[in-house]
Amino acid sequence: GENVEQHPSTLSVQEGDSAVIKCTYSDSASNYFPWYKQELGKRPQLIIDIRSNVGEKKDQRIAVTLNKTAKHFSLHITETQPEDSAVYFCAATIRSGGSNYKLTFGKGTLLTVNP
Amino acid sequence: AAGVIQSPRHLIKEKRETATLKCYPIPRHDTVYWYQQGPGQDPQFLISFYEKMQSDKGSIPDRFSAQQFSDYHSELNMSSLELGDSALYFCASSSDRLPDGYTFGSGTRLTVV
């Protein structure tokens, strides 16, 4: 089955700096890679996702890059703000066109943005 | 907009008791997923249902069972509860008509004492 490795497990940055979180996956058939932000005790919330036919996607201060050959993808947050502090999870899955797909999550990165 | 509704929000049970968690997906979503998230852990996939049929099975213990009903809501039944079952249980739903990802419910926090 799929295995997703995520690094680092904790990341502390100063407000305004950039943060980068990296993930690798094992199943070369995986074609959908979402990123979730989870605040303590709350639900995971999708912040950005990328499909295997795209190398990069950006949404305001958040961007995701995908290297299919190396089987890794990264989350980039620029101009970090204290409210960005949370646990971030990457995930990978095989989406075959239907809605039925299970996600394999990375272990998570605790991001702390210091004011 | 309607979201995924889970009940109860919190549940405290004793060891060896049973628990039933409920999930009401977003209207017209045809797939429901259950995930278990232990303290400081990533969500672990338990089971999913597509159009009321079990579609995939993950690390769900034999003590747990689940089903999806005709109105698409789903229930996760947990028997012979153990201390290690204490976790957040998330339900998520999706639709093949929508290209976006999952929508997660707010979760049920189960505490086994």
Image (cartoon, rainbow, N blue to C red):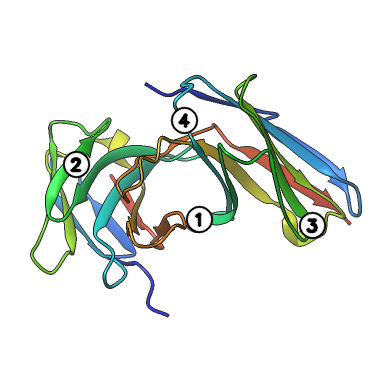
Q: Residue furthest bottom?
A: B1
Spatial distance from mark 1 to mark 3, Cα to Cα?
A: 25 Å
As rendered, which of B35 and B85 lies closer to the eye? B35
Name the residue beneath numbered marker 2.
B55
In what element is the residue under mark 4? loop
Location of residue B104 (image quadrant): bottom left
Q: Amino acid at mark 4?
A: Ser
Name the residue located 34 percent from the left edge and 57 percent from the top edge: B94
Residue A11 in the image: state x and y as whole percent.
76, 37
Q: Is residue A71 left or right of residue B102?
A: right
Task: Say the numbered circle drawn on residue A30.
Answer: 4
Q: Secondary structure at mark 3?
A: loop
Q: Secondary structure at mark 2?
A: strand
x and y percent of residue B76 in the render?
A: 18, 51
Q: Residue beneath label 1, please?
A: A41
Q: Are marks 1 and 4 in contact (CB under 8 Å)?
A: no
Badge 3 or badge 4: first in the primary sequence: 4
Is the Cβ of the residue at disc 3 closer than 8 Å to that at disc 4?
no
Q: Quadrant of residue A47?
A: bottom right
Label 2 neighbourhood size at 10 Å, few (<14), some (14-19), many (20+)?
some
Q: Which residue is mark 3?
A: A61
